[in-house]
Image (cartoon, helix red, strand yellow):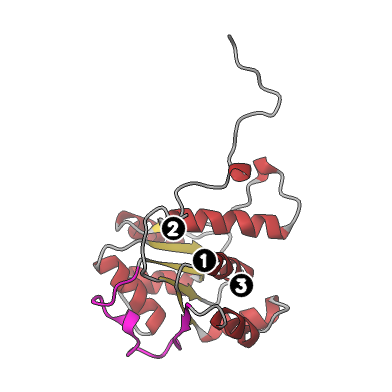
Amino acid sequence: MLHQETKYPVIVGITGASGSILACGVIDQLLLMNVPVIATISSAASMVWHEEMDESLGTALERWGDKGHFRHYPVGDLKAPIASGTYPIHAMVVVPCSMATLAAIAHGMSDNLLRRAADVCIKERRPLTLVPRETPLSAIHLETMASLARLGVTILPPDPPFYLKPRSLEEVVDFVTQRVLKSLGVTEALPEHMRYEGPANSTTAG
């Protein structure tokens, strides 16, 4: 159920950081919820996808396209509607987000469609979530993230929920996906099985 009912799409930008499976999880879940998706994918992201995923990017795009409410615009297409602030969208996520893209967004460098769409979200004050994939983080990375956070951008590192004792990579991806959806206002809360309820053997004093 949508936290904020909308007919407008969510933009999913995919960059060349490691973590293609996170992007796949987010798009799959949005489409499963019948949320319209517009994707734009950098050339570096295409290369990383080829290295990390069993399903080819072309096959994934065809599979998503079969859902009927999915569109893809090449990253070089600055004439795409999402390059304009007059085009209504619900929110945007960049997942995974490379440090180069993060820095470009922070400095207003709208030299491709993905970065321009993020810049539009900031200027139009629409929800924007970045899922950075880098470790360790330098002072440059941290200062850049802080500058974006002060603008209202959500910085959401894909940290595993160790307290939930995940048993597989898929469970971690599912958790991060749900955190992304909540940050975008697509859902109101995490599924019950993903919420921390306190120590398993705790008792309540009467």
Q: Which residues are magenta?
A: 69-89
Q: x%, y% of residue 73?
A: 44, 86
Q: Is residue 156 above or below residue 22?
A: above
Q: Earlier in the sequence, mark 3 or mark 1?
A: 3
Mark 3, other Cα within 10 Å: few <14 / some 14–19 / many ≥20: many
Which residue position holds label 2? 186
Spatial CA distance of label 3 from label 2 is 21 Å
Residue 176 pos. (x, y %) = 57, 56
- Say left or right for 162 vs 65: right
Name the residue: 31% across, 72% down.
Answer: 119
Tag 1: amino acid: Leu
Q: Is residue 100 left or right of residue 194?
A: left
Q: Is residue 68 visible?
A: yes
> Residues at badges 1 and 2 in contact (C-beta under 8 Å)?
yes
Inspect the image, locate mark 3, and give the three-letter code of the amino acid beneath it: Ser
- Check residue 204 for magenta coloring: no
Say whether disc 3 or disc 2 marks the residue closer to the N-terminus.
Answer: 3
Q: Is residue 72 above or below residue 181?
A: below
Instruction: Please give the residue where the numbered disc 1 appears in the rendered image.
Output: 30
